[in-house]
Image (cartoon, rainbow, N blue to C red):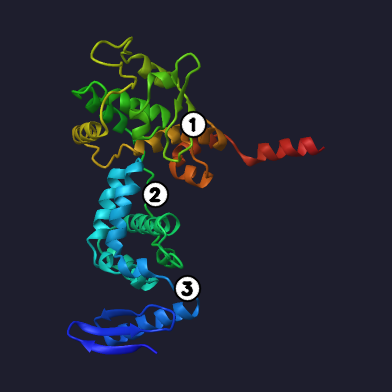
Amino acid sequence: MASISKRKNGWCAQVRRKGYAPRSKTLPTKSAALTWAREVEARIDAGKLPVSDGPLRETCLSELIARYLREVTPRKRSSASEALRLGKIKQCSLAREKLIDIAPRDIAAYRDRRLNEVKPATVRKELYLLASVIEVATKDWGFPFASNPVRAVSFPVANDARDRRLEAGEAEKLHKALQTTRNPYVRPIVMLAIETGLRRREVLELTWTNVDLERRIAYIPTTKTGVPRTIPLTDAALAVIKSLKRPEEGDEAGPVEDRLFPITVEAFKQAWKRVQKRSGLTDLRFHDLRHEALSRFCELGLTVPELAVISGHKDPRMLFRYAHLRADDLARKLAGRDWSAQRQLSQGVRA
């Protein structure tokens, strides 16, 4: 039976069971302390708490996150953004809790609090990342979690799908703004993105070695999905690449730069912001150009499997988020057609 006692800073709940280390937690109200104690007892009764839980009792969530930041995050392509996200989690009160005390109820409270501060999509990313931290700790570091408390809560629905495309006159504004860019690589990067549907990093990491102008293809070895792919190049894409100056051989200063665009991601981000400002298209993200490209390919009549070769999507449902067809374009395709002619043709075939 749990014991509840009044403390200066709240109510302390203590749970003692034979064969298990004692657990205690101080909460602001007596009812909250009783609820926590009942949850711990229920987890013990269900066999969801291990007998040997020393690492969980001795380690705070912030310590687990710090280790993940040192050992796991640097190996990821998204290390910079992940480090920022984990840094935010480390600052919250949940991170100061001992691992043994973290229950789904605590994760749900964190989720609800963050939903008042940021968008649902951000909260989803944080929860997925937190779940990954606990899974790595369980599988690779020997922390005896009986289950992942993050997976036990519902994640917020993120209705953040964008269907932004270049509207009438916007392509001209964008091209005009690109004409005055000081960096000579910005314009061809943008043009190539529109013609290929490549992500920003995929464009910036293109190398001459992986481009075959005769076969009209480009090999993308490192992708977001982790699966390399080879994409076709349109006439306009070929023209953009051919307009670039290809270094012929290295010199004493070092090996030749193999990338088509020797520009850093951060430098391009700043250049793109200036293009947005000059063009007046401040709501146009670079990733929207991927929407534009895939939608154009779809309008050309490419099938879903053909689009998937270009985009790299494995799930057609994700592909449909990018390939946005305009209703007025479909209306023009249907102009002059009617069902009666099609019905007469089908009846003639059956006869």
Q: Which residue is mark 2?
A: 161
Where, quadrant-wise, is the C terminus in this rendering?
A: top right
Q: Which residue is mark 3?
A: 48
Locate residue 114 relative to residue 294 in the image: left or right. Answer: left
Q: Which residue is mark 1?
A: 229
| Earlier-in-chain disc, 2 versus 1 | 2
Frontmost of labels 2 and 1 is 1
Q: Residues within 10 Å of mark 1 (few under 14, many from 20)?
A: some
Nearer-the-camera pick, 207 or 188:
207
| Quadrant position of residue 32 | bottom left
* Contact? badges 1 and 3 (CB < 8 Å): no
- Give percent across and percent down for residue 293: 41, 32
Q: Residues within 10 Å of mark 2 (few under 14, many from 20)?
A: few
- Give percent across and percent down for residue 220: 44, 29
Marks 2 and 1 sit apart, C-alpha to C-alpha, by: 24 Å
Q: Residues within 10 Å of mark 3 (few under 14, many from 20)?
A: some
Where, quadrant-wise, is the N terminus in this rendering?
A: bottom left
Instruction: Write the residue at 24% across / 67% down.
Output: 93
| Earlier-in-chain disc, 1 versus 3 | 3
